[in-house]
Amino acid sequence: MSDTKTERPEVLFVDDSSTVRAAANKILSKQYIVHQAINGKDAWEKLEANPDYAVVFADIQMPEMNGLQLLKHIRTSPDRRIAQKPIIMITGHSDSHAAMRAVFEMGATGFISKPFDDIDLISCACSYINLNQRLSQLEDMLGIDRQSGLYNALHFETEGCKALSMAIRHKLELEIAYIELKPLSEISESHSNSVITQVVVEVGKRIRNHLRDEETVARIGASKFALLLPLTSCSNSKTAIKRVKTMVRSMKFAINKSRLRFDIA
């Protein structure tokens, strides 16, 4: 008998009403692993700890951090896994059309009204989870790092093999560089994952902007990047790396009332 278990998608349901959360859990837990949050603040902390929820349901009206504020946090997150997540807003009779329009314009994926029934909630979850899974599969096929939006290690290896084969066949120059961001490990113990993500994503974007169109940058580790520089001599690659290093050193990150600087190895 096989011990293999089918992994069920994880859903985050956010509502300050324990009755509503219990009802949603009863309906959704038949097909999904359901996590609950009592308000936007609680939900945001859970999202930072686990960016891989398949979909988030969030009530608009909540204490401490309401649904609109939570949605803003999500859509402006530097982590693409969070920023592009399907967010279904839960509306009630007291929610005005203006509030619903504001939530929609901020990037809500869809709406569901209270009181909801079994079919509405399950079909809503199923539709957006399936869509999210297809998009994730597409990014995997394209070799995209979901967190940063850069190419991943597998794509770099594939493109690197092609470039190397071309360089050998036609006796062309090819340079490969590995860059590690430091001292990222030193701040990982005292700062949240979102801070680390913010630094890595922004540095990755800056490196990408400093390269030519035919050059490739990939994220191959938590704080490691790899550059593929075709038709580039050793001296020119050193110039390019020096330019990137100067750029990284000039960057400042305002984190917890302090300004942090980084360097590359």
Image: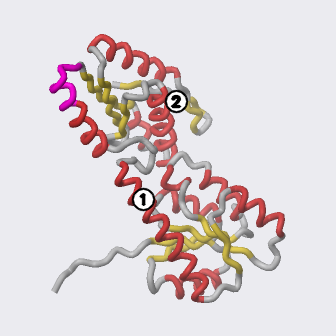
Contact, CB < 8 Å: mark 1 with mark 2?
no
How many neighbours does mark 2 have within 10 angstroms: few (below 14), some (14-19), or many (20 or more)?
A: some
Residue with the most extreme top position: 235
Name the quadrant containing residue 124. Answer: bottom right
Image location of residue 86, percent across then percent down: 56, 64
Image location of residue 92, percent across then percent down: 76, 77
Tag of residue 223: none
Judging by the rendered image, the residue that carries numbered circle 1 is 136
Q: Amino acid at mark 2?
A: Leu
| Nearer to us in this view, 190 or 135 | 135
Image location of residue 21, percent across then percent down: 60, 80
Judging by the rendered image, the residue that carries numbered circle 2 is 260
Q: Quadrant of the N terminus?
A: bottom left
> Relative to 147, is 35 above or below?
below
Q: Is residue 60 left or right of residue 52?
A: right
> Relative to 139, is 119 above or below?
below
Image location of residue 57, percent across then percent down: 60, 71
Name the quadrant containing residue 138. Answer: bottom left
Q: Is residue 76 left or right of residue 163?
A: right
Q: In the rendered structure, does residue 54 fall within the stretch colored magenta?
A: no
Q: In the rendered structure, does residue 169 fall within the stretch colored magenta?
A: yes
> Relative to 172, is 107 above or below?
below
Q: Magenta region: which residues? A: 164-172
Q: Amino acid at mark 1?
A: Ser
